[in-house]
Amino acid sequence: MKKVLDFSKPLYVLAPLAGLTDLPFRSVAKRFGADLTVSEMISSNALVHNSKKSLKMVEKSPLESPYSVQIAGADEAVVGRAVEILNGIEGIDIIDLNAGCPVPKIVSHGSGSSLLLDLEKLERIIATIKERSRKPLTSVKVRIGFQEKRPVEIARAVEAAGADFIAVHGRTRAGKFKSPVDYEAIRRIKEAVSIPVIANGDITDYAKARWVLEYTGADGVMIGRGAVGKPWLFYQLKNGVPDEEIDPALKREVILEHFDQMIAFYGDYGAVLFRKHLHTYSKAGYRGASAFRDRINRTENPEEMRELVWAFFDPANALS
């Protein structure tokens, strides 16, 4: 079996975020330093029912190697059939089970973080993936509990079921995205299991990522919202470049690469879809941001938008 991931040095992973970490965003993160990218969360039920949208979400960029596909599911038989479908798709290295999503629609179906309420069931589903999968690795994304914190118990269940590594969001389901992240719980997990542990939750910048790695002893960090609007964070981590030393010219290169990938994947409509990213990219550090956002909100032509992006993100327009 090929060596998919090298855990001998810190691993930098782009977390899956619904509606944000599509193929263009993932390809940019990968090009600029992410070690691993993960698809947006895909319903096992949707895969089994041959959902065209779900199959589109599985598609990967040629840059995405290694590549992980994250599935959600609560029924072992359905999850098993979904894995068999993924077995038939080339280019997937890891199948990841989502056991952490706090969204009510997912939880009400028994998927996501609701699996933390029944660790025996969680183990059975992981074991099903491990047994059925012909991909090199199986991983699991968890939170540290549903209502109460039980991080070590959860992590040991994941390990016992045969997962090759675990990503831990340091909040309970009840904590949603607002409660303080419990990095001590992640450190306890790292000390309790022998499989690699990836730390996740509120990793917003270079300094925080370095601190989380040191404090938890984790084998890597998974960054989601912290990379939205600054996917060059992976470049910083890979190359040891703190925030104050990041080159505005690199930022423009990353943003234009993201734009070009959007057009390549979505066609001309990618320019419209890219507006939400430009709103985030332009939030800090450039003159005339409000006027720029107003202009791009009225721009649909890809060539015109690219010229606007090139001009606005000129390093000379960056605030010192």
Image: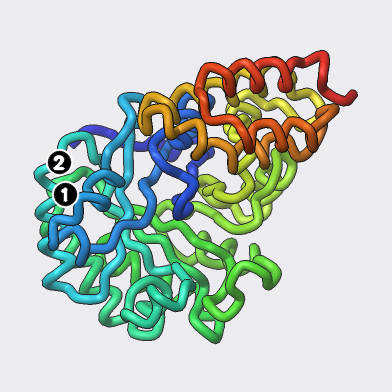
User: Which amino acid lies under the numbered mark 1 shown in the image of this protein?
Assistant: Leu
How far apart are labels 1 and 2 at the CA level? 5 Å
User: Which amino acid lies under the numbered mark 2 shown in the image of this protein?
Assistant: Ile
Residue 320 percent location from the top left of the image: 90, 24
Above or below: residue 254 compared with residue 223: above
Determine the residue located farthest toward the right in the rendered image.
320
Q: Which residue is the site of mark 1?
A: 86
Q: How is the image coloured?
A: rainbow
- Residue drawn at 52 percent across, 48 percent down: 222
- Residue drawn at 38 percent across, 51 percent down: 40
Mark 1 in CB contact with mark 2 (< 8 angstroms):
yes
Q: Which residue is the site of mark 2?
A: 89
Above or below: residue 262 compared with residue 315: below
Residue placed most toward the observer, 81 or 133: 81
Above or below: residue 43 compared with residue 317: below
Residue 127 percent location from the top left of the image: 20, 67
